[in-house]
Amino acid sequence: MAEGRRPELLAPAGDLEKLKIAVEYGADAVYFGGELFSLRAGAGNLSVEEIREGTRYAHDRGRKVYMTINIFAHNEDMDRLQEYLEEIAEIPIDGFIVSDPGVIFMIRQVIPGAEIHLSTQANTTNYASAAFWHSMGVKRIVTARELSFEEIRQIRDRTPEDMEIEAFVHGAMCISYSGRCLLSNFMTQRDANRGACSHPCRWKYALVEEQRPGEYIPVEEDERGSYFFNSKDLCMIAHIPQLVRAGIDSFKIEGRMKSIFYVAVTTGVYRKAIDAWLEDPEGWTYDPAWLEELCKVSHRDFTTGFYFGKPGGTEQNYGTSNYIKDYAFLGLVKEYDPQTGLATVEQRNKMVIGDRVEIFGPGTDFFEQELTEMTDEEGQPIDAAPHAQQIVKIPMKQPVGPFFMIRKRV
């Protein structure tokens, strides 16, 4: 990071609702995919009209939007890609995250002056590669996930000052080099490099000897199998100063396929940690409460990945590919009436009278209360809200607002 730059917090926006949540919970920028040509085809992604609305929503609040067009395109993709770029050319997107040189070339033709960010899929692992891409007009390099702090610092020191560096700081890790994987193609005929990965790295495997079919030999001790491709999740919340010192301009959270609950919590926690560093860089101290909060969303065990050197066997979870889910997301506050203290809540998981819940919102700490009353939209008392996206009214112990969320320990 060049001296004087403010680290950017970059959050995932798998659909328009997540984009708004990320912005409200403190992201400086969001990244999203369109309905075509993104490596997260399983995310909701945004239609052209939603891209237009989301860009306007972010810009009105002083935030940036980056669009992923990071597939490795085949010949059959190119005509449709050009048509798609022409559809979105007038939308003031702040940058395009791209991995394929041919796609970069086409964006330059259709949207002259577009800012290009080189995707982690391009596997940039050294300063010479970074300098090459910068000389080709690339503004920002998203480094390969397999780099240490020292390697990133060397890239920063040996590249032009106006070249920005972005790196992942939180979220799922891929077993293959920066996501360049063929396992999904072989196992399910779904192309991981064209947005359709089936995540076979999370499946259970066992060893079978050719002359002994049906005899499954565990690779590690487990019930007849092992998750030996299964990486832990990245978490760098305790290392904000090291990320800054390495020269990273943009701290990126993985998770376009994750829930709005995940986006809210991770964005909110990293916002607090970064703001604490901005307020007092020399006196910054890690707050264990940040990690406690991150653990309230669905996650795997955490790791620091490659930042402190090449990881060993402890970075894999051989026993299970299951997520740790200690909390359930119950509802999203849509409106709040300060006169009555009633919040209008859209249900996301079943909640019942008597539930002990936590309520949190943008820029706030959570508070606890018991659900003692609930009514339906017509004001009729109810004991439970079991229906998906059911609208209920709940009295709040403290003032809340739109985008606040309700959760409970399970």
Image (tube, helix red, strand yellow):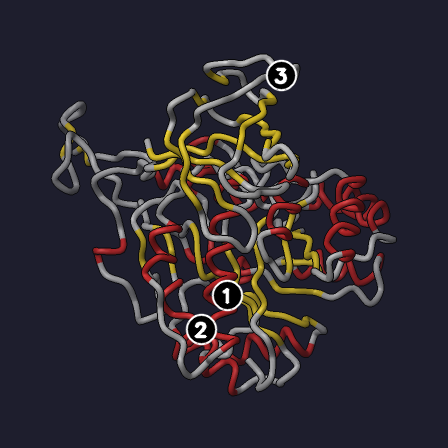
Q: Which residue is mark 2?
A: 243
Amino acid at dot 2: Leu
- The residue identified by callout 1 is 167
* Element marked by disc 3: loop
Q: In front here: 83 or 251? A: 251
Mark positioned earlier in the residue sequence (1 or 3): 1
Decide if residue 96 is on the left or right side of residue 201.
right
The amino acid type found where label 1 is placed reads Ala
N-term-proximal mark, 2 vs 1:
1
Q: CA distance from mark 2 to mark 1?
A: 9 Å
Quick one: quadrant of the C terminus? top left
Helix, strand or loop for disc 1: strand
Q: Position of residue 281 (x, y in %)?
A: 46, 80
Which of the two discs, 2 and 3, labels the residue nearer the N terminus? 2
x 39%, y 51%: residue: 294
**Number of other residues with Cα within 10 Å of mark 2, as a class: few under 14, some 14 to 19, many 20 or more:** many
Residue of label 3 = 379
- Displayed quadrant of residue 408: top left
Tell me whether the residue at label 1 lies in contact with that at label 3, contact meaning CB atoms closer than 8 angstroms: no
Do labels 2 and 1 touch, CB within 8 Å? yes
Q: Locate residue 94 relative to residue 305 in the image: left or right.
A: right
Judging depth in this view, the residue of 234 and 403 nearest the camera is: 403
Residue visible at 32% across and 50% down in the picture: 232
Q: Is residue 68 left or right of residue 350?
A: right
Q: Residue at x 68, y 57 (%)?
A: 66
Residue 209 image position (x, y, % from top left): 16, 34
Q: CA distance from mark 1 to mark 3?
A: 49 Å
Q: Nearer the viewer, residue 41 or 381?
A: 381
